[in-house]
Image (cartoon, rainbow, N blue to C red):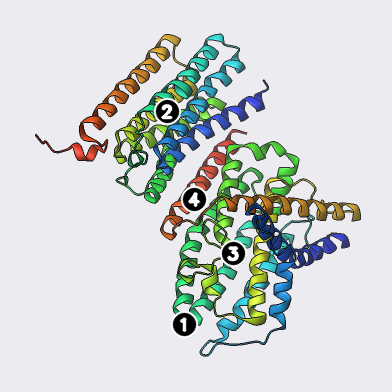
Amino acid sequence: MTQTTYTGALDLAAGAFLLAAVLIVWRRELRAIVRLLAWQGVALAAIPLIEGMQQRDGALITVGVIVLLLKALAIPVLLGRAVGTEVEERRESTPLVNTTASLLITAGLTVLAYAVTRPIIALDPTAATRAVPASFAVILIAVFVMVSRRRALSQAVGFLMLDNGIAATAFLITAGVPLIVELGASLDALFAVLVLGVLTGRMRRAFGDTDLDQLRELRD
Amino acid sequence: MSALAGVAAALQVVGVLAGAPLVVGGMRQVRARLEGRAGGGVGQPWRDLRKQLRKQQITPRGTTVVFALAPAVVAGSTLLIAAIVPLIALGSPLDSAADLFGVVGLLFLGTVALTLAGLDTGTAFGGMGSSREITIAALVEPTILLAVFALSVPGQSANLAAIVTGTTHNPAQVLTPGSLLAFVALIIVIIAETGRLPVDNPTTHLELTMIHEAMVLEYAGPRLALVEWASAMRLTVLLALVANLFLPWGIAGADPSLLAVVLGVAAITVKVVVLASLLAAGEVFMAKLRLFRVPELLAGSFLLALLAVTTSYVLAASS
């Protein structure tokens, strides 16, 4: 792989990664959000795969394949099963911040990410570190999604985006943490999704709804 | 600059004048066929224009010179854009004015002229249409400027010919994330600016949902023909401009030969026909957005344009 195609491919992967996060903020249908999360997983897995091919590093490619299977297949399938079958469960109820304002806040967060990561880029200006602002912006957007959504499932999606963002930052800055640490973190996320899936199911059975704002008060 | 470059610029204006109603007719025909109707034929807008132009000139009572001049301002500014932008050849005689920011300014001059005309009639629908149009225009303008800014970063110039030349020499830069995001943002903005679905329905006859049609409700006869013609020309020029900004192949150079000019005409015709058909085919599957959800769409496209600027800024720093 030549240097230009490597840079181009890495930029495209980072761009798609950020775009998926922005579209998750935009869309309200839960199924569409889960599908976008799967696409984000593909973009995330592409980063170690591209770097592994460039550096001819077998371990990185292995990590990339594992990330692809986990984040683009296993987790979205599990989340997709947690999406309710009832019609009113399929959409995010009105978020705390309306969509237009959320999109503008997302724009602000992206600019903020570019501003605060400048010292990191200045340390070691390679093609990979230049894409760090994109992954950092995904972390900030994920935190925003977690605090502004009401449904348990969308908050879980925010949590997984946060995990994706941290993993992407690690891949881009250090060309990947050691294999065993990466596996541990990824499996953690998988178990979190399993637990959240069970929890959402039980909540729906107990209360008939997963809107977390309605669970604030105690009742008998 | 050779004489042929001047000929090419003149050809652009004549081509847009003659071709714009055909583009609109073609889009209606594609739509009609996909919906299972026979359709009025590609030439129907031309027949409508001829009919309108033969009618008597009527000025509603109480309107001022603003109402009378607006169609001419819209048509004139659009024709000026058609003369400036590189559609057939690069070396237009107005090349020094071929600045993307200038083109955006001319575009909004036409929009504002029509909104003022809508207010000038003093009718409820005219005022409502103007208010909606200016709401959308106020949201569209920042997006269009940001998208333009993103496109001008790689070539380090906002001159249209310079941007197109840069893309011809380095086709890979079309596939960078910055340029792709700017493309999507520009397409959304053009749909909003020319009043197509899902922002405005160009074929609506229900006054409460109209935007562009509500403003021109009081026009009749030759003036109505001019307004319709101008809005068709705006659509054609913008489609051709986007096609050339992102897919500049086939455009003649700054000092063209006769063959290159002919080739340029053929290339731009093919590009506009393909783009317009795709747009019309896409519209079949879309419903009009609620007016209150339009700002959502435009905020989204603003965000895409902003991302385009930031990514192309970072990329330009790396190369």
For the residue pair A131 and B141, the one nearer the viewer reads as: B141
Tags 1 and 4 touching, CB below 8 Å: no
Q: Nearer the viewer, mark 3 or mark 1?
A: 1
Chain letter for mark 2: A
**Residue at the location (71% across, 50% down)?**
B274
The answer to which of marks 3 and 1 sits earlier in the sequence is 3
User: Could you tell me which secondary element the residue under label 4 belongs to?
Assistant: helix
Tags 4 and 3 touching, CB below 8 Å: no
Q: Between marks 3 and 1, how big is the CA–CA gap?
A: 27 Å
Q: Between marks 4 and 2, how big is the CA–CA gap?
A: 23 Å
The residue under label 3 is: B105
- On the image, the x and y values in percent for residue A163 come to 38, 25
Q: Are marks 1 and 2 on the same chain?
A: no
The answer to which of marks 1 and 4 sits earlier in the sequence is 1
Q: Which mark is residue B122?
A: 1
Give amino acid for label 2: Gly
Q: Nearer the viewer, mark 1 or mark 2?
A: 1
For the residue pair A90 and B181, the one nearer the viewer reads as: A90
Give amino acid for label 3: Gly
Q: Which mark is residue A165?
A: 2
Instruction: Quarter of the image for the C terminus of chain A: give it.
Output: top left
Q: Which mark is residue B4?
A: none
The residue under label 4 is: B302
